[in-house]
Amino acid sequence: MLAAAVTLGVLLFLSSKHISIVAAIGSTAFVLFAHPYADISRPKNVIGGYGISFLVGYLISLIPHASVFSGLVLAAAAVGLSMIFMLMTRTQHPPAAGAALGTVMAGFSLGVILILIVKIIVVAGAHYAIRPWLR
């Protein structure tokens, strides 16, 4: 139920334009509460993975593209680069790669990113707090 409440909280603040990022947050909620003791569920991985993905997505979104195809190539590159940097920093959290994709596809918005960072910290904190009672 906590995962559903967190997802609802994200949906209340974002438009359908950012649906791919919302989907990533929903996937994160599932991972945290279904696999509470997995490495990818540690707060360091969740917060670090999203931080990297948002940064990569932002930087890739600054690259001008002339066609739909080049935009898709850049979005795919954002996912790949996010994965590489998460692995290099040992902050891998697979759903976070979707945030890089969403940031490139929907365009960077500081307000959206700030809302998402707060929600991610809330999800990670809630997971950390109730982890002893999760199976």
Image: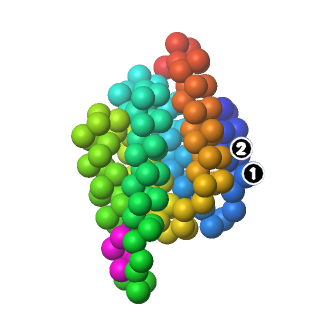
Which residue is more in the foreground, 50 or 126?
50
Residue at position x 66%, y 53% from top? 111
Q: Disc 2, disc 1: CB below 8 Å?
A: yes
Which residue is more in the foreground, 65 or 36?
65
Residue 63, image x, y percentages: 40, 72
Residue at position x 71%, y 46% from top? 8
Going by the image, does 89 lie left or right of 36? Answer: left
> In this figure, which residue is indicated by the disc labeled 1?
12
**Residue 34 seen by the camera:** no
Residue type, numbered disc 2: Gly
Residue 9, numbered circle: 2
Residue 98, image x, y percentages: 45, 55
Residue 73, image x, y percentages: 33, 73
Residue at position x 56%, y 14% from top? 133
Going by the image, does 45 lie left or right of 25? Answer: left
110 vs 129: above or below: below
- Within the magenta stretch, is there residue 49? no
* Magenta region, residue range: 70-75
Which image quarter holds the N terminus?
Answer: top right
